[in-house]
Image (spheres, rainbow, N blue to C red):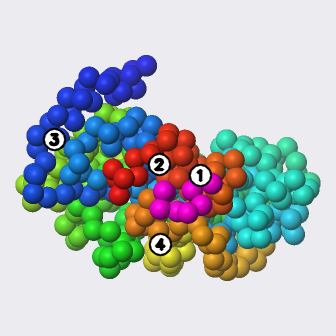
Amino acid sequence: MRYVDEFRDGTLARGIADRVAHEVRPDRSYRFMEFCGGHTHAIARYGVVDLLPAQVRMIHGPGCPVCVLPVGRIDNAIALALQHRVTLCTYADTLRVPASGKTSLLRAKAAGADVRMVYAASDALRIAREHPQREVVFFAIGFETTTPATALVLLEAERAGLGNFSVFCNHVLTPAAIAAILEAPRGAAAPALDGFVGPAHVSCVIGSAPYEPFAAKYSKPVVIAGFEPLDVMQAVRMLVRQVNEGRHEVENEYTRAVTRGGNARAIAAMAETFEPRPTFEWRGLGEVAGSALRIRDRFRRFDAEARYGIVYRPVPEPKGCECGAILRGAKSPSDCRLFGTVCTPENPVGSCMVSSEGSCAAWYGYGRFRDAARTA
Ligand code: SF4
């Protein structure tokens, strides 16, 4: 398949690995965070770490939509379904994220709540149209990748004058999260980083320009990369070069999809419907100023938070779960005592074991926990 097969070529991968090995300096280490769960998945699936020299360490970041959603937000969604008796629509992984009291949206569904899995935001809108007697809420999560689709359903709901549809908005912003990671005092809770592999799909929407301010401010290079293994390998090589040359620029490896300006129509739709929240709690990162979106006043009648008086309350992580530290890059999945024993993809304790983009699920699914010694 074009744009896929040629980016999974083993011979080419070994060639890039040889060049990386040739270019790394023996007297230093290189610690790069791949922000996106899609990259974590590619690294685990294709054994990218196995090809890299020992000086290069890949650190998983918080770029997994369901992983970063705090427990309290899932509790809010469950309350919508169980107490307000709405038809709650959301993406599949979200259904399985553990909430307070060993509940989840899937368990709420089993208890009789009308919770439905959708593939797209527009499916929720269709359900609202088909069931005018039902109150339908779309539980919207995700980074800038999924936000434009939510923006479009808000615009369409307004155009159609739908009275039984609203959105519980939990969309988050990538550049603010990366800045928060870099702002955190370095130490055990926040490892030192030499650069970032920048998101693929998010960058298709927002472009490469939004990373420029923090690359300059924090002197950290960013290389935006596609999700195929050769993309990641090439991005690592570009990062190694920037570090060696003392540069901290935003470079774009994923030129087949990402431009500097991004997708203007998607950006305009998001700006029309959403505005930044003053602050938002992330699992692992805590409260991060300006790191999420809320629905603009013009669309208030479609805002589930206003319509149902949703109040967010922070809830502690499940006991023993290290998702917070993993999402900050401070720990690896195998550092968690529950990994692979109490916590498995069939029986997830924390959010990082739910989605395929979650670090714990990727490590478990591809047997990367066997590499713990190598990546520690
Ligand atoms: S293995 Fe499970 S409990 Fe441990 S950090 Fe990962 S998701 Fe949390």
Which element type, helix, strand or loop, lies under badge 4? loop
What number is the disc on residue 285? 4
**Mark closer to the chain start, 1 or 3:** 3
**For discs 4 and 2, the disc positioned in front in the rendered view:** 2
Please give the name of the residue rendered at 21% of the width and 56% of the height, measured from the top-left corner.
30
Q: Which residue is mark 3?
A: 21
Which quadrant of the structure image shows residue 73? bottom right
- Left or right: residue 115 versus residue 199 is right
Q: CA distance from mark 2 to mark 3?
A: 24 Å
Q: Would you place residue 70 above or below residue 314 in this image?
A: above
Q: Give the percent coordinates (x, y) of residue 278.
A: 50, 79
- Left or right: residue 12 versus residue 89 is left
Which element type, helix, strand or loop, lies under badge 2? helix
- Circle 1 packing at 10 Å, graded few (<14), some (14-19), many (20+), is some
Q: CA distance from mark 1 to mark 4?
A: 24 Å
Labelled pair 2, 1 in contact (Cβ < 8 Å): yes
Q: Which residue is mark 1?
A: 340
Q: Give the percent coordinates (x, y) of residue 210.
A: 32, 60
Q: CA distance from mark 4 to mark 3?
A: 33 Å
What number is the disc on residue 369? 2
At label 1, which amino acid type do we have? Gly
**For discs 1 and 4, the disc positioned in front in the rendered view:** 1
Residues 67 and 129: in front is 67
At label 2, which amino acid type do we have? Phe
Which secondary structure class fits the magenta region best? loop
